[in-house]
Every structure is written in structure tokens, then in C-alpha cells.
């Protein structure tokens, strides 16, 4: 029953979130602030992880090619497919769930326990829309950009690994990148990214908004936000893969 109760509260909260902002100027200001905090501030870790992620995939693939019948261009092909289809949209989203999700939950949770949200309600402000909606819109817009950057960095990391180790030449690696490329894979990855961005922003906002107690409960809400966001990302990853790739 607790699960259904929580789902019901989430749905009711989303009804309040999905309303027209009361003041568009303030909403725009909040949106650009969230672009900075949710997107640009996460760029460094996205680039760092993506480069090494692509490098590891390339090295593992190169070392496992032990047959002369398998062309070395398969390394570039494998890196491209792995990074675009799974690593960038899913792994990076899981990392953002930890970094961004915990921040959203702790920020809103702190406002709840310090009664700032109650003050918004007394002033007639739709606090759910004011606090969660800009974060959700910012995540839906900026996360696909981060994932595209991650794709480029992952492929670049694979190339750097091959050049530095001498396992595969640039010509073979680039040839593999071009083999049987389908633009639909990019659409698939970005479609997953949008769903994951919605999950991260709204689930984290929900746990933060429903926080009760003090500083300890804020920490617990932040942990729950990361855990449940990650679980939902993994579940929806399977569902979306089944829908979009079959």
C-alpha cells in the first residue's frame, strides 16, 4: 500500500507541477539558473567519464580480436555502437541521477524543513510549479546536449586509446565508425535521455518536496531520490529498448 500511496502522491504533485508559471520572467530566470547548476556544472564529470569509458571499450575490444578474419575496424564499430546505444544515454544518466538528483532533493528538502515552502503557499505561490518545473524543463533541454557531448568524447577517448597504444590505426578506427551507421540510433539514445531526464528531475523533486523532519530526513530524501531514480532508469531502459529497437 505504501507504494501505491507514494505513486498517488507523485501523480497529485505532478498535477500541480504541470501548470503555467505565474510569472514568466521569474521562470526564465530560474530556467537559466538551472541550466548552469544542472547542466554546465555537470559537464566536467561527463567529459571525464566519457573519455575513459570509450578508451576502455576500445582497448577491451582490441585485445579480444584474436582472429585475422576479424578486421581491426571492428574496434571503431564496437565503440560507436556501445557508446551511442548504451553507455552515454544510460550510464551518464545514472551518474547524473547521483549528482543532479541528490542536489535537487536536498535543495527542495532543505526548503521544506526550513518552512520556506510553507511561506510560498501562504503567499499564494504554487510552490510545486515554482520549485520543480524549471528544474524539469532545464533537465529535458540540457541533458540531451550533455549526452551528445558524451558520445563525441567517448568516441574520441576510444581513438586516443588506440593511437597511444598503437593497437589500431586511425584509418581502421575511423573506418569502423563509418560502417553501417544508422541515424536512428541517435534518435533512440536521445529519446531515452529525455525520459531519464524527466525521471531524475521529477522523482528527485518529489522526494525533496515530501521531506518531513530535519537535516537527517533531508539526507534520507536525497538518498531515496538517487536510489529510486536509478532503479526507474534501469527499468525504463529495458522498456524503451524493447519498444524502440524491436
Image (cartoon, rainbow, N blue to C red):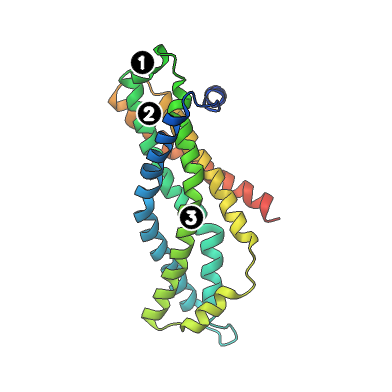
The single residue placed furthest to the bottom in the displayed view is 68
Residue 212: percent from left, percent from top: 37, 20
| Circle number at residue 147 | 3
Query: Residue at point 52% right, 78% down?
Result: 174
Residue indicated by mark 1: 119
| Circle number at residue 156 | none
Residue 57: percent from left, percent from top: 46, 68
Q: Are marks 3 and 2 in contact (CB under 8 Å)?
A: no
Q: CA distance from mark 1 to mark 2?
A: 13 Å
Query: Residue at point 65% right, 60% down?
Result: 184
Residue density around tag 3, few if under 14, some if 14–19, many if 20 or more, within 10 Å:
many
Residue density around tag 2, few if under 14, some if 14–19, many if 20 or more, within 10 Å:
many
Residue 63: percent from left, percent from top: 46, 78
Q: Is residue 45 left or right of residue 130?
A: left
Mark 1 or 3: in front is: 1
Taking 195 as reference, is 105 above or below it?
above
Q: Is residue 20 visible?
A: yes
Taking 213 as reference, is 64 above or below it?
below
Identify the image quadrant of the N terminus: top right
Residue indicated by mark 2: 108
If you read the primary sequence from the N terminus, does the residue marked by circle 3 or circle 2 appear first? 2
Query: Residue at point 57% right, 49% down?
Result: 192
If you read the primary sequence from the N terminus, does the residue marked by circle 1 or circle 2 appear first? 2
Question: Element type at marker 3?
Answer: helix
Q: CA distance from mark 1 to mark 3?
A: 37 Å
Identify the image quadrant of the C terminus: bottom right
Amino acid at each position: 500500500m505504501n507504494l501505491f500511496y507514494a505513486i498517488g502522491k507523485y501523480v497529485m504533485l505532478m498535477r500541480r507541477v504541470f501548470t503555467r508559471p505565474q510569472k514568466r520572467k521569474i521562470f526564465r530566470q530560474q530556467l537559466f539558473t538551472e541550466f548552469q547548476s544542472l547542466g554546465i556544472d555537470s559537464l566536467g564529470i561527463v567529459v571525464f567519464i566519457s573519455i575513459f569509458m570509450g578508451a576502455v571499450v576500445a582497448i577491451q575490444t582490441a585485445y579480444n580480436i584474436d582472429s585475422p578474419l576479424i578486421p581491426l575496424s571492428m574496434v571503431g564499430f564496437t565503440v560507436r555502437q556501445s557508446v551511442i546505444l548504451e553507455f552515454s544515454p544510460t550510464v551518464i544518466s545514472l551518474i547524473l541521477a547521483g549528482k543532479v538528483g541528490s542536489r535537487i532533493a536536498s535543495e527542495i528538502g532543505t526548503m521544506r524543513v526550513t518552512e520556506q515552502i510553507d511561506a510560498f503557499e501562504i503567499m499564494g505561490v504554487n510552490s510545486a510549479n515554482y520549485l520543480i518545473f524549471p528544474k524539469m524543463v532545464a533537465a529535458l533541454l540540457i541533458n540531451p546536449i550533455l549526452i551528445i557531448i558524451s558520445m563525441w568524447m567517448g568516441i574520441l577517448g576510444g581513438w586516443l586509446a588506440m593511437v597511444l597504444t598503437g593497437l589500431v590505426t586511425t584509418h581502421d578506427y575511423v573506418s569502423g565508425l563509418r560502417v553501417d551507421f544508422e541515424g536512428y540510433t541517435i534518435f533512440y539514445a536521445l529519446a531515452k535521455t529525455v525520459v531519464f531526464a524527466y525521471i531524475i528531475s521529477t522523482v528527485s523533486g518529489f522526494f525533496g518536496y515530501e521531506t518531513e523532519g530535519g537535516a537527517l530526513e533531508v539526507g534520507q530524501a536525497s538518498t531515496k531520490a538517487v536510489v529510486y531514480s536509478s532503479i526507474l532508469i534501469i527499468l525504463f531502459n529495458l522498456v524503451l529498448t524493447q519498444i524502440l529497437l524491436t
